[in-house]
Structure formats: C-alpha cells, structure tokens
Amino acid sequence: MADLEPIVGRYLRLPLGGRAHRVYFEEAGQGIPLVCLHTAGADGRQFRHLMNDPEITRHFRVLAFDMPWHGKSLPPAGWQDEEYTLTTHGYVELIRAFIAALGVSRPVVLGCSIGGKIVLELARLHGTEFRALIGLESADYQAPWYDDTGWLHRPDVHGGELAGALMSGLIAPQSPSETRWDTLWMYMQGGPGVFKGDLFFYRADGDFRDRVGAIDTRACPLYLLTGEYDFSCTPADTERTAAKIKGARVTVMKEIGHFPMSENPAQFRRYLLPVLEEVRARG
C-alpha cells in the first residue's frame, strides 16, 4: 500500500512588482492559517515536518510557498537579463499578495532567518492583519560573520556546494544526520545568485534597528525563538531586539541552530507546540 503524506502542492499566479509570477506552495491541515516563510537560498520543503505533524495540522492549515527564484517557483520572464536581489518592500509585497490571493483571514505567520527578520516589518507595518507573528532566528540586525558573498555567484565556483558548506556550521551538533543533510541539500540545489540575492536583504536592506521600537504587540502578539547554536542570528541578537519591543516574547531553544524546523524537527516542536496552543487559545 502507498503511504501518502497529507501534503498537497499547487501553483498560484501572482502579479508582483508589475510582473507575472507563478508561485508554488504546499499545504496540509485545517483550521487557523499558518503561513511559513523559508530561509535564504532554500524553499518550502523546510516545513514538511510541520505539515506531517497531526498535532499541528489538527488545528492549523499550514501553508508554505517557495519564493520566486526558489524551489519550484521559477523566476519571472526575462530573468536571464538581470541579477536577483531581495528587498524589504518586495518581500512584504510577496507575503501579503500570497495571503490575499488565498483569501485567508488574519493568519499566523512563522518565518525563519530572512523570514524571521521580515516578520518584524510585518509587525510594524501591518500587525492588525495577523493573528500572531512568530520569528525564528529573528533580529533587527546581524553583524556579518563572513566575507563578501561575490564568490557565491561566479562561473568557476559551484555556489550550491559552497552555500551548503557555509550553512553546515549553523546546524547544532545534536541535530540528527538525516535532517542535517536534508537541510543542506536544499542549499546545494539553489539557483545561481539566489542565495547572494537573499543575503542582500538579510545583511543590508533589512537593517531594522531604527524601527522595531514602533512595533505594537497589543495589535499582534510577537514570539521570537532562536537556537542556542545559531551564530548568524545569536540569542543575544534576538534578546537585544526584543528589549526594544514592549511585550515581545523571547525563547532560546536548546540543542538547535539556525534551521529549527528542518535540522531537528522533534526538538523544535517542543518549543513550537506551546506557542501555537497559546495562539489558538486566544481565539
């Protein structure tokens, strides 16, 4: 007998920045919409463990899309004549357009890394549109820990293998081998220049140090969860950010690095389930 998972994948056509895009997304479950945002250079497969978790899908409709240029979402027509660069404005537009197109009302948004960072801007600008916002590995600014990323976009270098090697150190030593390598495989598959383009937002355009103080958690609860082994967005980065936001909830996750939902899903759910239950209890 075939062992079918409950995950269903579809394509959605979206106009973004005045151009047509075809965006791939997967979903599972029913109930409160839970929109998941993947990390830089990866795709929505990072959330497959959440979508296969009956304790989550019993009450939440989990939705994860591949950003344009990532995973199964192709770049827009004409991509060969440009260099991909993710901006704050374009990222916010994408998330809100996806939610509006599906017609979901006041979803929870859970984002990791670049997804965790953009959660802060969603909270500041559009907090009333969401039931709750959950930032994984989220901070208003992270100091670069590597040299210029130009070497990720060279014809004589395999950018995917280098991206995987770069990310390998961000995974906690306790993470199981299988899920560790699942996480790195997504980075090895990335299109040329995509990881570099995402990091422009993560390191430059996404400097929110002067604006997170305007976030009103009375309009939308904000949860920030960071792995203890993450040296890209350290627990200190997240705690510094939360200190500027009245009412923000901070948790440092033990035995977890930069990719909680994919590197060690069993450990991560111990931290996520109580948050989701609290969100559900709020009604």
Image (spheres, grey):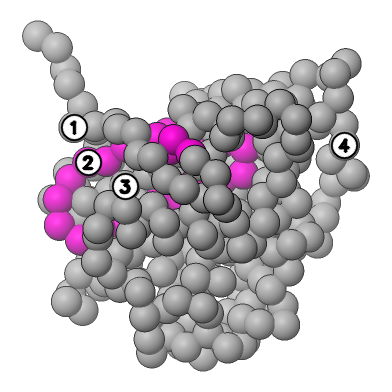
Q: Which numbered marker is on residue 28?
A: 2
- x and y percentages locating residue 132 in the rendered image: 35, 72
Return the residue at label 1. 6
Of pointers 3 and 4, the one earlier in the residue sequence: 3
Is 191 on the left or on the right of 204, as rendered?
Answer: left
Residue 273, visible in the rendered structure: no
- Label 4's element? helix
Question: Badges 1 and 2: C-beta atoms under 8 Å apart?
Answer: yes
**Please, what is the three-letter code of the amino acid marked with disc 4?**
Gly
Instruction: For marks 3 and 1, give the CA distance.
Output: 12 Å
Task: Assign the C terminus to one quadrant of the image.
Answer: bottom left
- Label 2's element? strand
Instruction: For marks 1 and 4, give the CA distance.
Output: 40 Å
- Label 1's element? loop
Is 174 on the left or on the right of 61, as rendered?
Answer: right
Return the residue at label 3. 63
Residue 143: name its quadrant: bottom right
Of pointers 1 and 4, the one earlier in the residue sequence: 1
